[in-house]
Image (tube, rainbow, N blue to C red):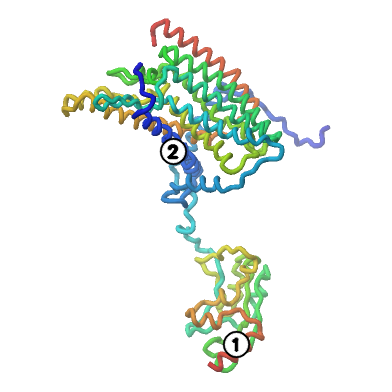
Amino acid sequence: MQLTNRAKVLEKKPMTLAERAYLPAIFQGLSITMRHFFMKKATVRYPEEVRPFSNTFRGLHVLKRDEQGRERCTACGLCAVACPAEAITMVAGERKKGEEGLYREEKYAISYEINMLRCIFCGLCEEACPKAAVYLQPDKMAPPRYERDEFIYGKDRLVEAVSPDERSVRGIQLTPDQATTLRGKLQQA
Amino acid sequence: MIELPALGWQSIVIFVVFALSLLIATYCTYAERVIAAFLQDRVGPDRAGPYGLAQPLADAVKMFTKEEFFPGGANKALFVFGPCLAMITALMSSAVIPFGNIMNFGNNLFFLQGIEVNIGMLWVFGVVSLGVYGVMIGGWASNNKFSLLGAIRAASQNISYELAMGMALIAVLMISGTLSLREITLQQSVAGEWHAWNIVKQPLGFIIFLVCAFAETNRTPFDLPECETELVGGYHTEYSSMKLGLYLFSEYVNIFVVSAVMSVLYFGGFNFPFQYELRDWFVSNQGWELASAQNLITLLGTVGLFLKIFAFIFFFMWIRWTLPRFRYDQLMRLGWTILIPLAVFNIVLTGGLILAGVI
């Protein structure tokens, strides 16, 4: 039954002698693979050898500090609003007395999380940030992990490190309650 | 023919030949992966050892530590015997291949060959044809319909290509008039000329032999016995651990043996061009004794033979990563309606040329 007029009659030419003998085609194939034997390899020995990233590459996020080592992020939430994948969540807190060296503005992020499983690395958070706090590093990829919850990056892994000691005290991802407790300890010290 | 001692120095040579064929077959697995990678613009194994050279060792450890598995209802004895038979037949045929001429130390003569028998070619052919039993028994004992189908395919393929192979061989035997591989080799070296290799006299026979060699070793494009798509793997579907390893490994031993046989039959074996001129040059210009000069030539010839064998092994792998598999009816048609008539034609042609005194 003919349904449409678009059917094409396929022309099946009888094969020539060279085609039927297959040998020319085989030799052609062999020459192609032999050419590839000497070609530059398309793969690299990855962990030892890393390909240069392109100029427009957007990789793992970083929360920048200013020139005095204070966190730039004020937890305004614009990055979270701009994020099309809704990968960013944060809890804002008020800077207390004595923390002027830690946070740049009166408001700061107590916790700041990016879900790398949701993130599409579009860079819109970077564009949205009025404080130039969040950046997508052009030379670093989010490393592979085995567990899903290891892909949720908190401040411990996002904030630019000043020195290992300071990071261990401040960088841990905190709930507001924990932050209050920790703040009390810091003020005593 | 010279009488050989059953034991003694010759047994060292036998041991070396045995170890060598195993070693080369082991590194064939590595070579296959590297060549496959290079042909496909990849890097290949490079984690185990320098350039991945310990890869065969790692593979062996993996094979040995995998789970031993016997399918329900399988005949256990036959199930184990199958891969053993495949391996035994593959190794046995390397015994008669002459890897070098005679080494001469004083009165001690070394044949660089496992055993020198005057039915060498018949031995290789008989033992190789037994190899199909390994596959057949393996497929039968698995108690699996797919494995049995794979084994039957293997059996019919091997038997049909053996016919053409034997007929291609007859033409060589007609020229040489002997079954001894050493004799065939020695006849291919004539002082003053190097083109006495049988490939010049038997180009058609060589091509037939080459195609059949691919089919005999179950290599692509004739690897119908194993087939992931239709047969869930083929005759070794039910095999695991080192039993599977033996099957795969015997394939590489077979490749080595077939490459050696082809080098010996068609490419002059351990002969290389201008060997007599080189020997005479050492004797007359360097003042060497004839025996030591001959020993050097023998060693060089052995190296030359191995280069030929490696070239063939490379060719096997090159083909494998170039050509796709045949369809089974195409395979059978090629064997029965093209190769066998061609081989018969080659026999008639050779006979005519011998009668005419051309070769």
Q: Position of residue A148 (x, y in %)?
A: 65, 66
Relative to B133, residue B358 above or below? above
> Callout 1: few (<14), some (14-19), or many (20+) C-alpha neighbours within 10 Å?
some
Instruction: Name the chain letter of the residue that bears numbered label 1.
Output: A
Label of residue A108 in the image: none
Where residue B241 sits, quadrant-wise, is top right
Whether residue B184 sits left or right of residue B274 in the image: it is right
Relative to B195, residue B14 above or below? below
Q: Position of residue B121 (x, y in %)?
A: 46, 20
Instruction: Name the chain letter of the residue that bears numbered label 2.
Output: B
> Callout 2: few (<14), some (14-19), or many (20+) C-alpha neighbours within 10 Å?
few
Label 1–label 2 contact, CB within 8 A: no
Label of residue B23 in the image: 2
Q: Secondary structure at mark 1?
A: helix
Report the number of discs.
Answer: 2
Q: Position of residue A98 (x, y in %)?
A: 55, 93
Residue drawn at x 48%, y 26% is B93
Residue drawn at x 23%, y 28% is B292
Identify which residue, B91 or A46, lies in the foreground: B91
The amino acid type of the residue labelled 2 equals Leu
Residue lying furthest right in this view? A1
Q: Position of residue B39 (x, y in %)?
A: 49, 41
Figure quadrant of the N terminus of chain B: top left
Label of residue A182 in the image: 1
Residue B321 seen in render: no
